[in-house]
Amino acid sequence: MKNNNRFLVILTSLLLFAVSVCAQEKVASGTIVAKYQAVPGNYNFWLYTPDDYDGMHPMPLVFYLHGASCCGHDLRKVRRYGTIDAVAKGKIVPAMVIAPQTQGAWSPKKLNELLEWAKKNYVIDTTRVYVLGMSLGGYGTMDFVNAYPEKIAAAIAFCGGCSSSTPDGLGKTCLWIMHGTADRAVGINCSKKVVDYLQKKGADKLLRYDWMQGGSHGVYARCFFLQKTYDWLFSHSLKDNPRKVDRTFDITKEDIKQTYSELKWFKGMGEDD
């Protein structure tokens, strides 16, 4: 019995070592590492660190929140599309990226714990923390921002909504909401409710929104490869005084089509969610 137990311990150790080795990947512009229980009781997540992070100069931080099709306990699902998938395929994102995996609705408290973990373990520019997500991740983006608006410089919510019926916090952060009019998975009214609430409260100064005519649920998966997406996020900082939302450019249907034409080598980029 003792020998069997010893064998199991050795086998488990070898398996954990193998997982840790496979869970680190060098990409063109940095390193992607899988983090399991880095914060006890919290989400497992992918962490992207650019090569130019030197531990001395503060680095912006991006949270990417996935949609419902990537939920579960297999962290590889999170790389079906999104920011981590983009950097793995060569996209230059000059920031650290945290891409957690949830099993259900996103918890703003847990996301904040991950933010605090990053601040303790890395030199983060706390004035340049950004969030973007799609579908369930769009809900997670708005819920996170609504709960901690003072910590987020800017956020983009694709085809999502907000779980709160009184999302006052969303009026305190630069927020871009996008939704397709032909979305059958998450109806556009989920986003319109947020916009209507902020407009009625007179809290829409930092808000911008776009409704893509004929846009389906999965069309925004392409935006994670679009340079304008990150340019818009990085144009904001908590240091801005006064705070104002960037309205100098748009993300159009033609921009998104062009993104795919440049990625002919890649197919199936999250079209279902």
Image (spheres, rainbow, N blue to C red):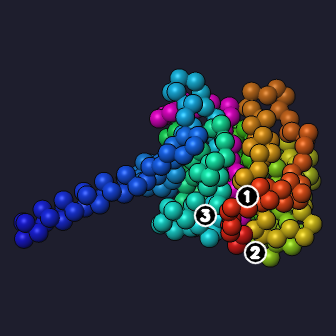
Crowding at dot 2, Cα within 10 Å, few <14 / some 14-19 / many 20+, comes out as some
Comes first in the chain, label 1 or label 2: 2
Mark 1 lies on residue: 263
Q: Is residue 193 above or below residue 229?
A: below
Q: Amino acid at mark 3?
A: Arg
- The residue beneath circle 3 is 80
Whether 152 is drawn above or below 237: the answer is below
Kindly identify the residue that appears in the image at 57 percent across and 30 percent down.
52
Q: Are marks 3 and 1 in contact (CB under 8 Å)?
A: no
Residue 40 image point, x, y percent:
41, 51
What is the distance, in whole Å, between disc 3 and disc 1 at their CAs?
15 Å
Compare marks 2 and 3 and give the one earlier in the sequence.
Answer: 3
The magenta-colored residue range is 120-137
The residue singled out by tag 2 in the image is 185
Above or below, 219 relative to 98: below
Q: Are marks 2 and 3 in contact (CB under 8 Å)?
A: no
Alpha carbons under labels 1 and 2: distance apart: 25 Å
